[in-house]
Image (tube, rainbow, N blue to C red):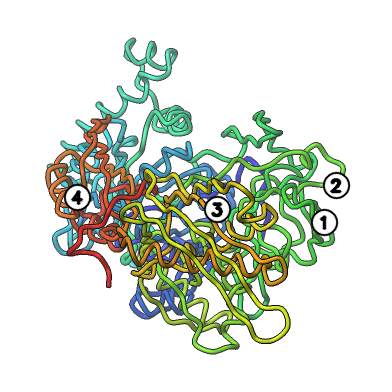
Amino acid sequence: MDQATTPRIRTVALLGASGAGKTTLTEALLHRAGVLTRAGRVEDGSTVSDHEPEEIARGVSLGLGVAPFGWTADDGSTYDVTLLDTPGALDFAGVVDAALTAADLALVVVSAVDGVQAGTHLAWEAAGAAGVPRMVVVTKEDKARADFHHALEDLRAAFGQALVPLELPVGEEQAFGGVADVLSEQGFAYDADGTHHVQDLPADVAAEEHRLHEEVTEEIVAHDDDQLERYLAGDEPTAAELERTLAHEVRDGQAVPVLVVSGVTGVGVDRLADLLCELGPGPGDRRVSVLAGTTEVEVGVDPDGPALVHVFRTVADPFVGQVTLFRVLSGTVRPGDRLVCTSTHVEERVSGLFRLRGKEHLPVDAARAGEVAAVAKLTGTPTGALLAAKGSPGVACTARPPRERQRVYALALEPVTQSDDDRLSAALARLVGDDPTLAVDRTGDRTVLRGLGDTHLTVALERLARVFGVHVTTAPVPVGYRETIARTVEVEGRLKKQSGGHGQFAVVKMRVSPLPRGAGLEFVDRVVGGAIPRTYLPAVERGVHEAMAAGGPHGFPVVDVRVEVVDGKAHSVDSSDMAFRTAASIGMKEALATAGTTVLEPVCRVHVTVPSTVQGDVMSDLSARRGRITDTVAQDGGSVVVEATVPEAELARYVLDLRSLTGGRADLRVEPDHYEPCPEHLTPA
């Protein structure tokens, strides 16, 4: 592949809702650029981006698709473009975040049929949070019920008036055959091979295009004092001058161009590629920084500077092992270079260097500042890490932490065979290394996998089986119930055994009483007169701990009790630590059986951010889950944060129900808060 210089590099993340046409658009761009002789189809599982079996089976993107190509734009310059095709499902928002750390431009893809969807909001907000400039492309203009104007109204209603339509469709649905260029006031008709030629516009389109031209021109020149002064003096700027000014506005987030295409027929695809190159920022147009301790350090995008590389994604490949995707922030990386991971301090050798195009590896002799490339078998460098040249200042730096996505859905895993059990921990560690939005923890004696939703975990477990050969069954995560003693009681724990030789003897008298929630265990020594020698009291406390951990009458660990040791007996020969440990355990179990226990259920603090239009529905649903609304806070943009306390038992599938209730327009955070007595009719058997 021809290598472009740094100013001519464009890295573009394609974002948007599932089904908006991102993957089809990627195929169309690759085909129009001459990379593909024939565009693949999502329905056939033949696309470059969606090549994993899980993606082909579902017909949607689930991972990050990388698609580089070369493009000679209208301005005569040759550009090196890398498309990062991302999933639209909320469960895979972590992939969107990863792509945005490597991209200089976010291309938000919106269907002309469906308009703005939940995934569109996710894309827009993610790009804004990452500080990445945006452009919008309306796709599927050739489909039945396509309506560009309705989609544009949706976009403006959702995201404001910074949207600048640069094109209008000429015809819609099956009649979509060309575009009207708002800046040059020309019409372009498309031929079957995807090329276009100038053609007169229909009268109605010409009138609308001229009106838009005046509005857009005024909007663009308003951000450039010199151009505005000339415009007011009657000097109409050319289309090229407007494009140059608009490119600065796009870079600064002041304007969001809107284009229109059909990925199936190819109408508008070449103009989209031109404008991505001419209006989109390059690596040197945006500020890139890393952290030196807590101080931000700006990185100069210099191909001749010291090498500094950001790893934004890793993928477990069943054939070549771990594939590390990275972006070169500074310097030039070549095969054979040795770089140091700044977080693990492991020295890595770049044994081979290539660019990914789907699953295809394209060897390259160097990766320069601003470019996206890949290398295999960097086992000591996790996702999100920096790699720096040995001895360079970058060795003391770390990458900015990624956006935190809370893992709100979980499943308990059970290995199918002993072999699966032996390999499970290592395989899960590899999965989490590939996808940091997954997490593994232990709940009791169970392994728990946490993620962003049910599809997220389902796909992860399919990859666990396909790539690592580890098979598991799943179950809901058990709720962490606890018990506490219901009332104060005095008991005696007695152990007396004689079997020849030294026997076992210990007597422990205890007063056991309940404590406030969260107090834990309070162990008090009230023995007088040496009835129990002090050397045995630690053993008594251990026995109490063991009995509490073993569970009360309902089988749950016991918490929040006060144990006062008031008296006891010891034998000079037959007493021992083990005897008193056992006697204390016996006494504690008797106290729980005699006084009875109250089952405590964990209660979580829930923060739900939703559009204000569904606030009432969300609050009603939380109340139906035994939740208590504690606060509501209105936010900018028409959203509201609902805060509540809800029993954990009611939250197992809450994120799935919440997305259904809000059409996917919800953000959920759940935090453990406290324990409360479980209602008797809901007490687990």
- Where is residue 252? Give x, y as percent: 46, 29
Numbered tag placed on residue 347 in the rendering? 1
Ranked by sequence position, the earlier of labels 3 and 1 is 3
Badge 3 vs badge 4, beta-carbon distance below 8 Å: no
Q: Residues within 10 Å of mark 4 (few under 14, many from 20)?
A: many
Give the residue displayed 61% in from the left and 51% down from the top: 384
Q: Nearer the viewer, residue 159 or 631?
A: 631
Q: Residues within 10 Å of mark 2 (few under 14, many from 20)?
A: some
Q: Secondary structure at mark 2?
A: loop
Spatial CA span between label 3 and label 1: 30 Å
Q: Residues within 10 Å of mark 3 (few under 14, many from 20)?
A: many
Spatial CA span between label 2 and label 3: 30 Å
Whether residue 135 sits left or right of residue 610 in the image: it is: right
**Residue 600 in view here:** yes
> Which residue corresponds to mark 3?
81
The relative height of residue 245 versus residue 37 in the rendered view (above or below) is: above
Give the residue displayed 56% in from the left and 63% down from the top: 543
- Where is residue 352? Give x, y as percent: 76, 66
Give the residue displayed 67% in from the left and 52% down from the top: 534
Occupied quadrant, residue 209: top left
Q: Secondary structure at mark 3?
A: strand
Occupied quadrant, residue 39: bottom left
Spatial CA span between label 2 and label 4: 54 Å
Whether residue 379 sits left or right of residue 77 in the image: it is: right
| Quarter of the image where the C terminus is located | bottom left
Spatial CA span between label 3 and label 4: 47 Å
Q: Amino acid at mark 3?
A: Val
Q: Nearer the viewer, mark 2 or mark 3?
A: 2
Q: Nearer the viewer, mark 2 or mark 4?
A: 4
